[in-house]
Image (tube, rainbow, N blue to C red):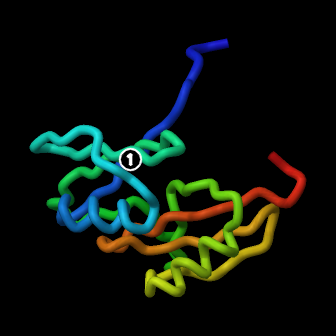
């Protein structure tokens, strides 16, 4: 076995540290743990870490297929994707299509247009 990986973090390009801190805090419970001139690190109660980097080049964290379809590069696991989807809809967060395939999932757009997936495992799978 190679090196043991203990956790992961996501780097998200944002145009405004303050606006993104507030938005991810309100909707997903993230709180600032480290502030630097080049990045801000946040963590939620589950221990998920995200890093905001100033987006000076109009980048996004997702990729786009040649046919124009958008694909998230990473996502968040939740207990109930349907409930998370309803929450996002109720809060006016732009979301993609809801899927029921090997679990339930959807993707949302953050303030900067990053397309991020939310997924829950099928019932009985952990």
Q: Residue furthest right?
A: 124
Q: Residue furthest left?
A: 37
- Residue 79, quarter of the rendered image: bottom right
- Crowding near the residue tagged with mark 1, few <14, some 14–19, many ≥20 C-alpha atoms within 10 Å: many
Q: Secondary structure at mark 1?
A: strand
| Residue 3, placed above or below residue 104 | above
What residue sits 38% from the left and 71% below the top?
Answer: 110
| Residue 94, placed above or below residue 79 | below
Q: Horizontal and vertical percent for residue 28?
A: 46, 61
Q: Which residue is mark 1?
A: 50
Please give left or right for residue 22 compared with residue 83 in the image. Answer: left
What residue sits 49% from the left and 40% below the top?
Answer: 47
| Between 28 and 64, the one nearer to me in the picture | 28
Q: Horizontal and vertical percent for residue 22?
A: 28, 64
| Residue 86, placed above or below residue 50 | below
| Between 110 and 19, the one nearer to me in the picture | 19
What residue sits 86% from the left and 59% below the top?
Answer: 123
What residue sits 56% from the left and 15% below the top?
Answer: 3
Please give left or right for residue 73 compared with residue 57 in the image. Answer: right
Quadrant holding the N terminus: top right
Q: Horizontal and vertical percent for residue 102?
A: 81, 62
Please give left or right for residue 40 compared with residue 124 in the image. Answer: left
Q: How many marks?
A: 1
């Amino acid at each position: 076995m190679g090196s043991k990986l203990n956790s992961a973090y996501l780097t998200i390009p944002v145009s405004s540290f303050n606006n993104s801190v507030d938005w991810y805090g309100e909707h997903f419970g993230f709180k600032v743990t480290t502030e630097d001139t080049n990045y801000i690190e946040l963590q939620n109660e589950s221990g998920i870490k995200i890093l905001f980097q100033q987006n000076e080049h109009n980048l996004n964290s997702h990729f786009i297929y040649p046919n124009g379809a958008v694909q998230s590069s990473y996502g968040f696991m939740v207990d109930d994707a349907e409930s998370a989807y309803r929450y996002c809809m109720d809060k006016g967060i732009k979301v993609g299509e809801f899927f029921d395939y090997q679990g339930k999932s959807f993707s949302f757009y953050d303030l900067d247009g990053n397309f991020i997936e939310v997924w829950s495992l099928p019932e009985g799978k952990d």
